Image: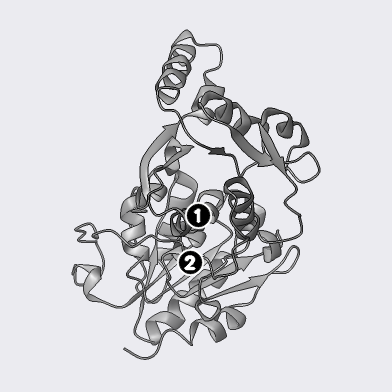
Amino acid sequence: GDVVHNLPVVADIRSHFPGAEIDWVVEENFADIPALHPGVRRVWPVAMRRWRRQFFRPSAWREIAGYRRALRGQEYDAVIDTQGLLKSVILTSMARGPSHGQDRATAREPLAARGYTHTYNVARGRHAVVRNRELAALALGYGPPTTPPDYGIRAPVPPTLTLPHKGGEDFFGRPYVVCLHGTSRASKEWPESHWRELSERLANSGYAAIFPWGNETEKARAERLGAGGGSPIVLPRLGLRDLAAILGRAQAVVGVDSGLTHLACALDRPTVAIYTDTSPVLTGVYPRDASRAVNLGKAGTTPSVDAVWIVLARWTPAP
């Protein structure tokens, strides 16, 4: 989600500086997302999560040193850190060039502000997309953006998949809705009974329910849902680029609080985002066109199937 929330910054910068060359440092597992943006010159995949797990291994420290040397081989006019975290300021310090970030009063981790050359007060209480765009504007000296966010990415060419479901046909020949059931913790999940009922309603309306998965827990849940009514389709495990291709051609997407749900919104697909344990006010899906995405629920409130269906029905006419 953090990666997707920064995509509009690229369009903002290039609208004011058409010749700008923009590089992006991003966790290696998510490198495919900024790589989809034609305005990004180079993606620097970083392995902070993996390095933390291998902290006492000499091989990890050699890899860190090599990464730092490579990154410092390029001098930048500005290095902007929108995360405002201690781990992100470490990466910011590796790059050569004046650094820009939020001040102590507004950074997510106040100590991070001590690591920047220039700091700015980016008021809290607003959506992450708005705050990221404002920070970049302050850092580069242009006015705060007032236009809708332009995520700037398009779905790549879809993979060739023939999936084991009734008839065995390639599912790209059928209208479908992607159901993003996987998320970072159990408290953010939508009940399986709700997914099962939604799948059956979609089938009755002429749509296939597509269930991706990214780990063994999600795979087991997808297989349980795939065994239910409505002939839902369980995908094989796919990388982010292939998932983006599938999301980008969906009739609509229904997803819990996860990065893939934000990616669907960035790809301009009609999106229903389901929240059960967090508030969508500051980090919910934030579409370019408000009619293309809806956030439902909040901490302690689980949206019903009926609530989701009322929204989804706008985008799923009888094929």
- Identified by mark 1, the residue type is Val
Which structural element holds mark 2? helix
Query: Which one is in front, 46 or 197?
Result: 46
272 above or below 134? below
Residue 282, percent from left and from top: 69, 60
Left or right: where 215 falls relative to 102: left
Residue at point 34% right, 73% down?
A: 231
Left or right: where 256 falls relative to 103: left
Judged from this view, the residue extending furthest toward the top is: 58
Mark 2: few/some/many CA within 10 Å (<14, 14-19, 20+): many
Which structural element holds mark 1? helix
Q: Are marks 1 and 2 in contact (CB under 8 Å)?
A: yes
- Mark 2 sits on what residue? 265
Residue 62, percent from left and from top: 44, 12
Residue 197, percent from left and from top: 51, 76
Query: What is the distance, in whole Å, between disc 1 and disc 2 at their CAs?
Result: 9 Å
116 above or below 150? above
112 above or below 164? above
Query: Which one is in front, 232 or 132?
Result: 132
The quarter of the picture where the C terminus appears is bottom left
Residue 289, percent from left and from top: 51, 76
Q: Is residue 236 visible?
A: no
User: How many numbered discs sit on the rendered protein?
Assistant: 2
Q: Is residue 298 visible?
A: yes
Query: Which one is in front, 143 or 12?
Result: 143
- Mark 1 sits on what residue? 4
